[in-house]
Each structure stands twice: as C-alpha cells, then as structure tokens.
Image: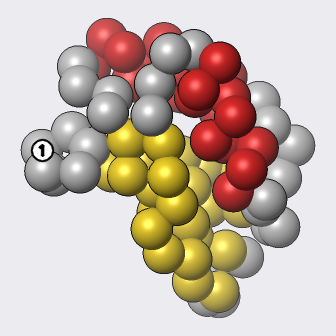
Amino acid sequence: MHLTVFKTNVATPQQAGNLQPMISALPPITHCNFDLDDCDNILRIISTDLQPELVCNLLQQQGFNCEPMESFVYQR
C-alpha cells in the first residue's frame, strides 16, 4: 500500500465532500481524506499503486490546486 500526501487549496468541508467521491472512484485508491485544519489543506490518499498526476489532474479539472508532497510505502 502507498500513502501519498498532497497540498491543496480545498478550503471548505463542502468542497472536500464534493471531491471525495470523485477521488475515491479512481481505481487504485482505497481511501482518501482531507485535513482542512492543516495549513496546507492536506489530502491523504491510500492506494495500491497511485500515479499522483491522476489526482492533481482531477482536482485541477475541478478548479483546485494540488501538488504531491510526500509518498510512503507501508503495510497495514
């Protein structure tokens, strides 16, 4: 499994709630969540094998900024 952390400009719970189903629908993603209390409005994604560009492109198509910050491999 991979944990990838993104910096975004998603600012409200409503925006995050609208984006979450779209992000979760990407095939390699098993879980995602936003941390809007963080100064970088973090998006965390757990996936089997994620290409960060997929997420960035999706958010950009919806009018948001998104850039990958970190990626980790881990075992549950």
Asked if residue 72 lies left or right of residue 42, the reply is right
Does residue 6 appear anywhere in the picture?
Answer: yes
- Graded by Cα atoms within 10 Å as few (under 14), some (14 to 19) or many (20 or more), the crowding at tag 1 reads few
Kind of residue at disc 1:
Asp
Asked if residue 74 lies left or right of residue 48, the reply is left
* Residue lying at 52% horizontally and 60% vertically, measured from the top left: 68
x, y (%) of residue 10?
33, 28
Does residue 29 appear anywhere in the picture?
Answer: no
x, y (%) of residue 37?
12, 44
* Residue lying at 73% horizontally and 50% vertically, measured from the top left: 53
Q: How many marks?
A: 1
Q: Is residue 40 above or below residue 10?
A: below
Q: Label 1's element?
A: loop
Q: Is residue 63 above or below residue 39?
A: above
Query: Residue 2 lies in what quarter of the image?
Result: bottom right
Query: Residue 13 lies in what quarter of the image?
Result: top left
* Residue lying at 72% horizontally and 76% vertically, measured from the top left: 1
Asked if residue 54 lies left or right of residue 37, the reply is right
Q: Nearer the viewer, residue 30 or 16?
A: 16
Its colouring scheme is: secondary structure
Query: Residue 72 lies in what quarter of the image?
Result: bottom right
Quadrant where the C terminus sits is bottom right
* Residue lying at 62% horizontally and 41% vertically, measured from the top left: 56
Q: Nearer the viewer, residue 65 or 34?
A: 65
From the image, tell me which residue sits under label 1. Answer: 37
x, y (%) of residue 28?
83, 53
x, y (%) of residue 67?
50, 52
